[in-house]
Structures are given as C-alpha cells and as structure tokens.
C-alpha cells in the first residue's frame, strides 16, 4: 500500500510530498469542487498522483468529467485518476436536480460514457448509446487522442462493488471499512464483477482510513475518531455494514444522540471494538500497531490517511495530517498491479488545425 491523503492545502501538501506521500485526493461538497481541488494538487505537487476520490458522478455530465480530466492530464501527464461515487438519492434529487434512479446501472453507463470521451481519437466521432446517455459528437478540432486514465468507483455495498470490478479499473473504499468488510464483502464482490468479464489483472484498491494521531493528547484524537465514525453511521445506507458486524445496538444509541444534538453522546456510543476495527488513532505507536495488525485488510494500492472532519477545526486537521507523516513506512507494501499507461498527447493550442 502506498500512502496518500486528502489534499491538505499547498503548504502542508508540499511538506507531505517531500516526506513520501505519493497520492492526494479531492472530494465534492457544497463548499468545494473535486476537480478544482485536483487542479490545486497538480499545481502544488511534482510527482504524486492526483484525482477525485470521490466526485459526484451525476452532478456532471460524462462530457464535463472527461473535459476536466483532459485538462488535468495536460498539466500532469500520467498522474491523474478519477474516483466516482453515486451519492445519496436525496442529494442527487434535492441538491443537483439530477435523476439518480437505478444508480448502479446509471454509474456503470457513466463510466462507459466518460471513457468514450477519453478514448476518442482525433478525426473520429465520439459515440455512445445506452439507457441513460446518448452521445454522437463530431469534434473537428484536433484536441482529442486516447487517454487511459484509471476510473474507480466508490463501492460500499455489494452491487456497487461488483460493478466496480466489472466496468471500472477498481474500487474506492470508505473510511468505515473494516478488515471483515474488505475481506468478506467488498473484495469478493469486486472479484465477482471482474470474473464476469474475464478480467485478468487485479482491480485497483484505493481507500480512506480514518486517522487521528496525537502523541501529546491521544485521548483527544481518539474522541475525534469516535465522533467521525458516529457521524458516518447516522446514515442508513450503511445498515448492511452495521448488521454484518452486529453493531445494531450501539448504532441505535448514536443515532438517538444525533437526533438529540448530543455530539458527545454520539462518540460515546462508538464501542472500543468499533474504534479498533475502523480507525487508526491514538499515539504514533498505537497507530503503527494498528497498521501492522490490519496489514492484510487495508487498501492494497493507495490508503488515504484521512483526519476526522466532523467538529474538527482546520488547524487540528492540519496537525493530524502532519502527525500521520510519521506513519510512512508502517503500511504494508502494495501488491504489483498493472495500471493502464496514460498516452500523452499534444493538446491543440491554435485557432486552426
């Protein structure tokens, strides 16, 4: 596993890349755009991989995803990846005004339609026809040329994980993932999807890891990790995960605390077992021991060590980010995985062909 992190800003990002961080990711929310943040990553780094993990798939057209990727690739050839997530149904409907019915089938088509734009050669029409997207674009300017940028899907539950193995280059794991969820649920589902299309190479595994390290105040770091876990588990989308682990009772307590506005009660409901299975937290020594214990059940390719964000201020998140740099070298080595080469093309820069 290579060490990555959500983009911490230019100052900390430069420090992190010099310390050995090899990948940075960006996300979408109401106050930030995944592609704009990826552009910041590209501008502020020299060698690290950069990309959304994740971008909301249905908030943009396949054309918009592909156009952003082409421009980013022109600035950082060979360094760009794309992680797509379907997002919650209500977010798609109420925030984006987007149709998100049949999200698994829709996101599979999104991947195919984005690839239609990315794989287009100059002089060829860009064509795709499916149930959700129809593309027939005659692009006369010589601005195309095939790009094999890795596309991964946020696959939490089994259907989406299988779809990631079938249509994408890999899967992006959630910060809640435990050893059991990776080994018993997600990896078998991804492999079923890959086997269905006779895929030879192992699908990529990227994933978030809730990481809070503070040698001076480890109890504070642990409390922040508990609240982050609790905040995620307020969402019923994760009920299969909860049932798989037999955590229905503590999750019922933390959801009741959430409804009452009791954030301390939310964290207190997260059991020691839940904390140990999900997070990397406490002192540096504690974190290293957790990584060693979970060596076989972390993302095999890139683990994004993510500081808690729920009720955690900017300065404390930056402190967690810097503290996590001491974990470089503690993570297990990645298995070799063939990654498609990204063909470098010369972008069109004139007014005429």
Image (spheres, rainbow, N blue to C red):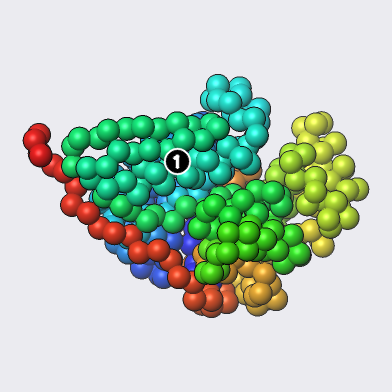
* Residue name at image x 54 percent, y 69 percent: 200
* Residue name at image x 38 percent, y 38 percent: 127
The residue tagged 1 is: 113
**Quadrant position of residue 265:** top right
> Where residue 201 sits in the image (x, y, percent)?
52, 69
State the count of labels.
Answer: 1
| Picture layout, residue 303 above or below residue 90 | below
Residue 268 at least partly seen: no
> Where residue 133 sits in the image (x, y, percent)?
48, 32
| Picture layout, residue 89 above or below residue 73 | above
In the image shown, does 236 or 6 lie closer to the viewer?
Answer: 236
In the image shown, does 255 or 225 lie closer to the viewer?
Answer: 255
> Where residue 324 sits in the image (x, y, percent)?
53, 65
Question: Is 244 placed left or right of 225 in the picture?
Answer: right
**Quadrant position of residue 143:** top left
* Residue name at image x 40 percent, y 63 percent: 340
The 10 Å Cα crowd at callout 1, few under 14, some 14 to 19, many 20 or more, is many
> Where residue 187 sits in the image (x, y, percent)?
67, 63
Question: Is 101 placed left or right of 118 in the picture?
Answer: right
In the image shown, does 269 or 78 lie closer to the viewer?
Answer: 78
Residue 75 at least partly seen: yes
| Picture layout, residue 303 above or below residue 128 | below
Give SS at disc 1: helix
In the image shown, does 219 or 43 lie closer to the viewer?
Answer: 43
Location of the C terminus by quadrant is top left
* Residue name at image x 61 percent, y 22 percent: 94
């Amino acid at each position: 596993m290579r060490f990555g992190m959500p983009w911490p800003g230019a100052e900390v990002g430069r420090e992190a890349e010099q310390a050995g961080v090899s990948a940075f990711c960006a996300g979408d929310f109401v106050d930030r755009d995944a592609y704009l943040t990826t552009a910041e990553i590209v501008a502020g780094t020299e060698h690290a991989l950069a990309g959304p993990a994740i971008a909301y798939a249905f908030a943009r057209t396949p054309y918009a995803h592909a156009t952003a990727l082409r421009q980013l690739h022109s600035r950082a050839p060979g360094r760009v990846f794309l992680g797509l997530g379907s997002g919650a149904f209500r977010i798609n409907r109420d925030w984006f005004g987007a149709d998100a019915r049949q999200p698994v089938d829709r996101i599979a088509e999104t991947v195919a339609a984005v690839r239609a734009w990315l794989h287009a050669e100059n002089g060829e029409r860009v064509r795709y026809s499916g149930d959700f997207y129809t593309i027939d674009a005659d692009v006369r300017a010589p601005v195309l040329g095939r790009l094999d940028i890795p596309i991964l899907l946020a696959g939490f539950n089994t259907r989406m994980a299988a779809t990631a193995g079938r249509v994408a280059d890999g899967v992006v794991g959630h910060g809640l993932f435990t050893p059991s969820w990776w080994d018993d649920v997600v990896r078998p589902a991804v492999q079923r999807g890959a086997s269905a299309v006779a895929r030879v190479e192992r699908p990529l595994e990227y994933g978030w890891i809730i990481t809070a390290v503070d040698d001076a105040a480890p109890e504070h770091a642990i409390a922040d990790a508990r609240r982050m876990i609790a905040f995620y588990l307020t969402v019923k989308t994760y009920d299969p995960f909860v049932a798989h682990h037999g955590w229905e009772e503590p999750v019922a307590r933390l959801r009741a605390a959430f409804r009452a506005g009791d954030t301390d009660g939310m964290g207190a409901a997260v059991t020691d077992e839940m904390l140990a299975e999900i997070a990397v937290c406490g002192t540096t020594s504690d974190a290293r021991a957790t990584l060693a214990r979970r060596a076989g059940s972390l993302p095999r390719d890139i683990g994004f060590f993510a500081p808690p964000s729920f009720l955690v201020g900017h300065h404390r998140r930056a402190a967690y980010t810097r503290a996590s740099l001491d974990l470089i070298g503690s993570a297990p080595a990645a298995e070799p995985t063939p990654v498609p080469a990204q063909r470098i093309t010369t972008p069109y820069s004139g007014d005429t062909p």
